[in-house]
Amino acid sequence: MRDRLVLPILIPVAVAGVIFLLIFSVSRVLLALEAHYATPLALLLALGILAVSALLATGPRISRSLLYLLTAVPASAVIAVGLYLAVRPGEEAAAGTGGPAPVTAVTMIATDNKFSLTEITIPINTEITFTLENKGQAIHNWRVLNLKDKDGKDITTQLLSGGKSETIKFTVTQTGTFDFLCDVHPVEMRGKLTVVAAAPAAGGAPATGAGPAAPGAPAGAIVIVATDNKFDRTQITIKANEPTTVTLQNKGSAIHNWHVLNVKDKDGKEITTKLLTGGQSETITFTITQTGTFDYLCDVHPVEMRGKLTVQ
């Protein structure tokens, strides 16, 4: 009696659960692939499902073993791969728990409507130089919430129209993590300012998008993290006629590189890293003798992975 009541409910629920798990697993697999691989694979899966369905609907009666081979085996494989991709350690875990090194000079680029940096770490009781460059068309500013400088003043720039910039200096006397935003676009343009009781990294890492130096890298070096398919820095500012060190860390699964267009180093060489497979990194040092703004990209993914290198 109990089976008659339970089975009609349990079987559809179990089937629905398997279907949901299969769909979820397929999505994980497709998201883990590059776009030009994911689309053909999705089409092949759809065609495979249609072909098997047509065979089952119109073909002669088939054995259980063949039915299992055509359905359960590939479905189990897809679910296993999808679950692995869903539970494997993420990029953040792989990168370790240490936060970025504190800096004393920051250049923030505001576009419509985005800040170039959403996380900034600075040292306590140290004068910070902050520059906001509005490269958008709309009006933007930068303001830290719930925090004053040592003189009790708000930490904020003026409202800047497109093309204008402003540099402010401030000193924070308490540690903690504070929100910053653009008052005109407080939903889209937000980030976190972390104040730590630590000495600043040598050289202060003073660039837009300039991350902390990689272990063993020269002070003030720029670290760019490549994932699938994105650079973590899309705006970088460096000085002309000074050596610049860039480290590219490929934390994705696909092949990536970093290549600056339409400018050479002082020796006439291309400014580019090698093509790096997932988990690899490379450090290059170059000097640019002309000022200007130049595009950089990944040669493998030139549409999605682009940015601007400004030489001052």
Image (cartoon, rainbow, N blue to C red):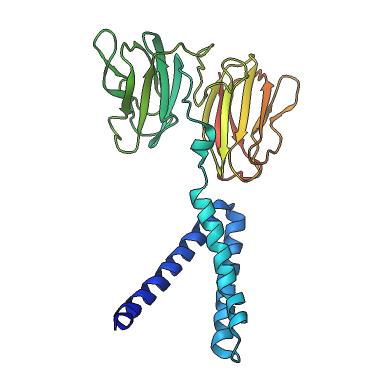
Residue ID at (61%, 75%): 69
Q: Residue 289: tell me if it is visible.
A: yes
- Quadrant where the N terminus is found in the figure: bottom left
Image coords of residue 261 (percent x, y) = 65, 33
Q: Nearer the viewer, residue 236 or 232?
A: 232
Q: Quadrant of the C terminus?
A: top right
Above or below, comparing residue 17 to residue 94 in the picture: below
Q: Is residue 300 above or below residue 137?
A: below
Left or right of residue 304: residue 285:
right
User: In the picture provided, is 160 more to the left or to the right than 37?
Assistant: left
Decide if residue 133 is in sight here: no
Which quadrant would residue 178 be assigned to in this image?
Answer: top left
Q: Find residue 241 and report its horizontal and vertical position in percent.
A: 64, 14
Above or below, 74 against 227 in this view is: below
Quarter where residue 306 is shown? top right
Tell me what residue is drawn at x 37 percent, y 12 percent.
Answer: 124
94 vs 191, nearest the viewer: 94
Is 241 left or right of 173, judged from the image as shown? right
How many circles with numbers are drawn on the protein?
Answer: 0
Q: Residue at x 53, y 53 (%)?
A: 84
Q: Residue at x 51, y 20 (%)?
A: 207
Q: Residue 70 at x, y = what percent? A: 60, 76
